[in-house]
Image (spheres, rainbow, N blue to C red):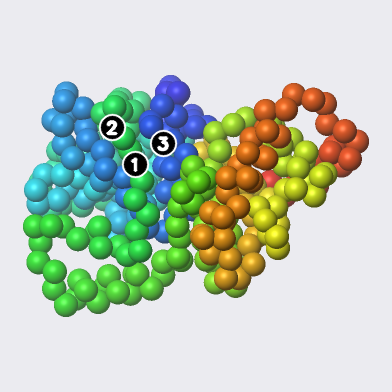
């Protein structure tokens, strides 16, 4: 979807890019992750690293080798996140190696990420334990750089992808552990599916887990479950196949909700939150 004005809100800015769900997760949920991409031949076939966040929350940096690293969690102007990030990438492509992009000048002529990136790539996500991807391979890694990295790394909440639950992420948030699952299904269908399961007391992942609500982010639904301390990503993975089958069956159902399911749905809707 393209906007006609820089202020028009685009509900799903990453729509059309492979692994849209993971891009949304990187924007909203994951502290440190990267995806390798490339610009189209028309734009030089330049290697691009899509990253969660960069130092100083820079939107983009052109590295010494001419490649670009782009920060998806950076603040960009306008109502179309893809156009703002696309403009940041376009500016980085035109700047000198080793230079960060600061202010972004978005206009109606600014390209979107979908215009610049080669969409035939795999766009496979790599969840990182550190911010070492900040380091320019061509720059010196000084003691000051190491100290800054160590401080930044301390802020990372342990996060991991769940292998058997595509676009599902376990996170250790300190006092609690969570599962956050990014879905591209219609939001009403997702709520209905949770309601159907909740009415049967089957909305948890496994024993001791609890559905607690959903986010809406970049046009997608992200249900969230609380997990017992020590459950870990392995605990989620052990239940993932059975839970996914149960959830997808409920998601595909077209039967009208029962009275009990409608009551469950009312409570679920009250726990919806939109992230901007």
Please say if the residues under marks 3 and 1 sit with CB atoms less than 8 Å apart.
yes
Q: Position of residue 18 (x, y in %)?
A: 38, 32
Graded by Cα atoms within 10 Å as few (under 14), some (14 to 19) or many (20 or more), the crowding at tag 3 reads: some
Please name whichever residue, 52 or 103, is drawn nearer the observer in this view of the structure.
Answer: 52
N-term mark: 3 or 2: 3
The answer for how far apart the CA atoms under marks 3 and 2 are is 10 Å
Q: Position of residue 161 (x, y in %)?
A: 45, 52
Graded by Cα atoms within 10 Å as few (under 14), some (14 to 19) or many (20 or more), the crowding at tag 2 reads: few
Indicate which disc residue 121 carries.
2
Name which residue lies at 25% across and 58% down: 133
67 above or below 227? above
15 above or below 272? above
Which residue does the numbered mark 3 point to in the structure image?
19
Q: Position of residue 206 (x, y in %)?
A: 67, 56
| Mark 1, secondary structure of its residue | loop
N-term mark: 3 or 1: 3
Name which residue lies at 34% across and 69% down: 152
| Mark 3, secondary structure of its residue | loop
Please name whichever residue, 18 or 206, is drawn nearer the observer in this view of the structure.
Answer: 206
């Amino acid at each position: 979807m393209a906007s006609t004005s820089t202020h028009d809100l685009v509900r799903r800015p990453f729509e059309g890019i492979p692994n849209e769900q993971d891009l949304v997760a990187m924007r909203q949920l994951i502290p440190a992750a990267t995806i390798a991409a490339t610009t189209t031949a028309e734009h030089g076939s330049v290697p691009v690293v899509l990253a969660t966040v960069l130092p100083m929350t820079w939107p983009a940096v052109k590295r010494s080798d001419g490649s670009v690293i782009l920060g998806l969690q950076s603040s960009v102007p306008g109502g179309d996140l893809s156009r703002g990030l696309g403009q940041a990438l376009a500016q980085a492509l035109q700047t000198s190696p080793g230079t960060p992009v600061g202010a972004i000048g978005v206009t109606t002529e600014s390209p979107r990420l979908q215009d610049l990136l080669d969409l035939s790539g795999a766009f496979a996500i790599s969840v990182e334990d550190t911010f070492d991807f900040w380091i320019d391979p061509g720059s010196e890694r000084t003691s000051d750089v190491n100290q800054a990295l160590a401080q930044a790394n301390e802020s990372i909440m342990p996060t991991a992808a769940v292998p058997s639950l595509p676009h599902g992420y376990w996170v250790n948030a300190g006092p609690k552990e969570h599962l956050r699952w990014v879905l591209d299904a219609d939001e009403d269908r997702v709520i209905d599916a949770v309601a159907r399961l909740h009415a049967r007391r089957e909305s948890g992942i496994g024993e001791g887990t609890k559905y607690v609500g959903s986010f809406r982010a970049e046009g997608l639904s992200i249900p969230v479950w609380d997990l017992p301390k020590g459950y870990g990503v392995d605990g989620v993975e052990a239940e993932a196949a059975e839970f996914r089958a149960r959830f997808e069956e409920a998601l595909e159902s077209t039967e009208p909700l029962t009275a009990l399911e409608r009551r469950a749905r009312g409570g679920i809707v009250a726990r919806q939150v939109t992230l901007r």
